[in-house]
Each structure stands twice: as C-alpha cells, then as structure tokens.
Image: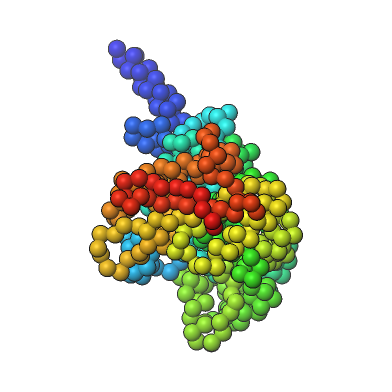
C-alpha cells in the first residue's frame, strides 16, 4: 500500500495537469485557473514585454524577461500609472471597488479560453483595448471580464498599455537616441507588441493566430483606428471593432491630430520647466510626478499644448491620420464593425456614416450599430444616466451581474443578442453567424445601422435596422 500511494499521487497530478495544463510561452511556463464547474480557463497578468522602467522608460517595448519555474497566472497585473479616480462621473459606474495599485511595470495581458493546451483548436481570437482617454483605465475593470466570450468559443485577450506622459511623451532627446529618429507613441507600440505576443503564443491557448480581431471602445477604439493605419501592425489582425471611436470625417478627425513638431516643442518646454533637462533626470523622476506634470505645467505656464499624452503622427508607427488613410485607401482592408451609443458626442454619428460609406464604396463590409438603451438606475444621485458613453460595455461583455444597476429581463436578453453578434463577427467577419442576414452591412442603398434596445415593458430585446 505504501508503494501505491506515490503512484496514486502521481496519477492525480497528471490528471490535474491534463485538465489545467502547464503552457509554455515567451518567457517561460505558466498555469492559469479553471472557473468552478466550467470549461473556461483564465490566465491573468501575463507579461508580454519587459517592464518599461528605469532605462526602458520612454523606449519601445523590449522582449519579455524570462522567469524560472511555473508562473501562476492568477492575479491581474498592475494598471499603468495614472491619476486616482475622484468621486462622480465614471467612478460609481466602473470603479466602485476603488483603484488598484498603479505601477510603471504594467505591460501584462489576460486571457480567457476554453481550450488551453490545444494548439490545433483554431479558436478565433480578439484583443480588447480599454478606453480612458489615453490617460486612465485598465484591462481588468469589472465590466471587462472575458468569460462569456470564452464560453462562446472565442479566446479573449485584454492588455494594459502605457498611458499619459509615460506612454506618449515626445522629446527631441528621446528622438535623438531612438534608432528610427522618433519619440512618443510608446503606448501604441505596446499594443503592437501585444499583437506580436498573440501571434507567437496564442496557439498554446487554443487560439488561431491567423484569425485575430482588434476591438476597443473610446480611446481603445481610437487605438484600433491607429492600428488600422500603422504599417507596424499589418498582418497581425484581420477584423476590427470600433466602439465610440473618434470621427473619421476629416473635419472631425482629432485622432493623432496634433502636429508632431508642436508636441516636441511643448513637451521639451514642459520638461525644462520642471527642471528635467537630461534624459537621465527625466528617467530618474518619480512616476507619480510624471502623471500630474502636464496639468501642473498648463496651470502654471498657461501653455495649453498639445502635449504627448496620446498618439501623434510620427511618420513611423503612425504615418498619417486615420481619416486621410481611409480616404486614400491606405487603412487595413478588412471587415469592420463600427458603432456608438445614442448618448455619444453627436459628431461621432456623421463620422461613422462617412467611414462606412467610403468602405462600402471600396467593397469592404462595414456593420454599423447604435446602442440605444438608457440604463436603469436605483434612484441614487450623481450617477451617469441614459445611454451614456461606455454604457454598452456591460452588454458587450455580458457582465450585467457585476453591476449595481437593477437590470431587467430585457437587458439580459439584449446582452445575449449583442454578445452573440460580436462573437459571430469575431469568428467570421459577419455578426449574423449562421442565421439569416438580419444585420446588413451599410450601403448607399440602405445607409442603416442595427439599433439595440429593450421593449417598453423591459422584458425583451428589441433589435432592428434603422437609418444611421
């Protein structure tokens, strides 16, 4: 019997390994966690690049540092450095649990999958890029859980990237040391590094590196737009979902709209004002100081920018604006889903129409939508109301049960409809899946969008095509 016990223990370990296999990725081996009672596995806080700290501050992302042993990917990584959330606004909506610890060491991603350790499974993959104006937010906010996507046969990846000055500072001294002669757009380069990590490693999680969609909302949607322009990301994805992105119409396009020379001059003046005249001084400065520097400088100097706190046209990672690339036929030639919430900035709607019309003329399908469900409230004061910017996130991730709002039966039905359309698009480029073509692509003959609502009695989802 004593000889049998080690054999039984060995068998048990093998059985556990088969259920939750140890995977080998860039950097080393890791293991995730299986959701209780489900065939869904989550891997949290996986490094996709070296920590951008010390001498790597304001440099393009570098290869992952290898680790020893089996890494337990059980905790989300640190969000990028940013200002703490203040009361009101989005704080009671998405940040009601308080802020996690922010850190420069933030280049991690998270994965939800149903087929780990099955390189031939060929599941479609989506990379989610969070919003927050390029200065706030993180990939593990409560509404951004990928479990429901995994249940529906998609490998969901979400990634953190550098924000604000630490993610986008442009400075002549940084340009001088860079092999490509540019600076800024480090947060954008992080996103490209995440896509390359997916290409090299996602098969370990059952994903198909040849079937990758990029998806984002607000600044995440603007990030999707810049990736669709960048020559550095070509071939790394083949579909895109743009949720409440900045307008594509030239007169409304403020994506990477700042003049690079002006950003370089303003950022240098800001650093000089703060007493940072060398790269050594800049890289030795506390990260917390960098987070607040732009606001302090604007307040004290009266200089309103533009500053390097978002992507700019650097002629390298981002050669031109999204609108000019679109109308010049130089964006990624792929299927697109583009939409908004009814409470968005009204300038977004004509931008979507212009983009969809141009892509339709080029023979590329564009599926447009409007989320038009005013979210229910429980009567508390000082919270966001209506179909506000970002309201659809609870639905596209099907995470309504994580929210304090008193969602109705119709909301859960609407979340079912929306995530089914989103995952179908990720799988095939068509949100209708194998069903009838209810959601038709935008065309000159039918310039319509799919509207997502609930019934008057809030018991059913109501979805249909209407003029955009």
Identity of the residue furthest to the left in this view: 379
Instruction: Determine if residue 121 is in view.
Output: yes
Residue drawn at point x = 33 percent, y = 70 percent: 87
| Quarter of the image that includes the N terminus | top left
In the image, residue 325 above or below residue 433: below
Instruction: Determine if residue 128 is in view.
Output: no
Residue drawn at point x = 67 percent, y = 74 percent: 259
Of residues 325 and 14, the one nearer the viewer is 325
In the image, residue 45 above or below residue 277: above
Q: Position of residue 63 (x, y in %)?
A: 61, 50
Of residues 408 and 197, the one nearer the viewer is 408
Residue 121, quarter of picture: top right
Residue 183, quarter of picture: bottom right
Of residues 403 and 197, the one nearer the viewer is 403
Q: Position of residue 32 (x, y in %)?
A: 43, 38
Q: Position of residue 168 (x, y in %)?
A: 59, 67
Residue drawn at point x = 45 percent, y = 47 percent: 463
Q: Position of residue 326 (x, y in %)?
A: 69, 59
In-image side of 453 versus 308 (left or right)? left
In the image, residue 197 above or below residue 285: above
Identity of the residue furthest to the top in this view: 1
Of residues 42 and 246, the one nearer the viewer is 246
| Quarter of the image that includes the C terminus | bottom right
Identity of the residue furthest to the bottom in this view: 301
In the image, residue 127 above or below residue 277: above
Residue drawn at point x = 39 percent, y = 56 percent: 373
Identity of the residue furthest to the front in this view: 445
In-image side of 312 versus 349 (left or right)? right
How has the structure been colored for display?
A: rainbow
Q: How many marks?
A: 0
């Amino acid at each position: 019997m004593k000889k049998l016990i080690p054999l039984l223990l060995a068998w048990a370990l093998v059985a556990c390994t088969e259920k939750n296999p140890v995977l080998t990725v860039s950097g080393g081996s890791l293991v995730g966690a299986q959701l209780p009672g489900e065939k869904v596995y989550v891997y949290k806080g996986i490094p996709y690049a070296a920590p951008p700290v010390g001498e790597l501050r304001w440099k393009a992302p570098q290869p992952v540092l290898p680790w020893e042993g089996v890494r337990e990917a059980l905790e989300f990584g640190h969000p990028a450095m940013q200002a703490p959330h203040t009361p009101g606004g989005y704080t009671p909506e998405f940040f009601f649990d308080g802020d996690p610890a922010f850190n420069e060491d933030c280049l991690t991603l998270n994965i939800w999958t149903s087929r780990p350790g099955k390189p031939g499974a060929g599941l479609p993959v989506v990379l989610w890029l969070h919003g927050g104006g390029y200065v706030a937010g993180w990939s593990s906010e409560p509404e951004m859980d990928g479990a429901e996507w995994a249940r529906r046969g998609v490998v969901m990846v979400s990634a953190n990237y550098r924000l604000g000055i630490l993610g986008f500072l442009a400075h002549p001294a940084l340009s001088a040391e860079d092999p490509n002669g540019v600076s800024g757009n480090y947060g954008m380069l992080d996103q490209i590094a995440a896509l390359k990590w997916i290409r090299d490693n996602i098969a370990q999680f059952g994903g198909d590196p040849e079937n990758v969609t990029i998806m984002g909302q607000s600044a995440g949607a603007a990030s999707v737009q810049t990736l669709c322009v960048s020559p550095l990301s070509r071939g790394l994805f083949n579909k895109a979902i743009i949720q409440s992105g900045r307008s594509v119409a030239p007169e409304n396009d403020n994506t990477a709209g700042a003049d690079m020379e002006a950003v370089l001059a303003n950022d240098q003046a800001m650093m000089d004002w703060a007493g940072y005249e060398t790269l050594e001084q800049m890289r030795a400065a506390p990260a917390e100081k960098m987070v607040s520097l732009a606001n302090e400088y604007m307040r004290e100097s009266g200089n309103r920018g533009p500053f390097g706190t978002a992507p700019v046209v650097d002629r390298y990672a981002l050669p031109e604006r999204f609108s000019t690339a679109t109308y010049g036929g130089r964006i990624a030639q792929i299927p697109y889903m583009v939409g908004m919430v009814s409470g968005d900035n009204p300038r977004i709607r004509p931008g979507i129409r212009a983009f969809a019309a141009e892509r339709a003329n080029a023979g590329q399908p564009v599926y447009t939508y409007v989320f038009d469900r005013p979210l229910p409230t429980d009567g508390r004061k000082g919270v966001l109301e209506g179909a506000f910017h970002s309201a659809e996130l609870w639905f596209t991730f099907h995470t309504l049960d994580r929210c304090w709002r008193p969602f109705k039966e119709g909301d859960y039905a609407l979340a079912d409809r929306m995530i089914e359309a989103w995952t179908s698009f990720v799988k095939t480029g068509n949100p209708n899946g194998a069903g009838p073509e209810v959601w038709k692509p935008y065309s000159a003959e039918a310039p319509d969008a799919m509207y997502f609502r609930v019934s008057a009695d809030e018991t059913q989802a109501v979805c249909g095509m209407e003029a955009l």
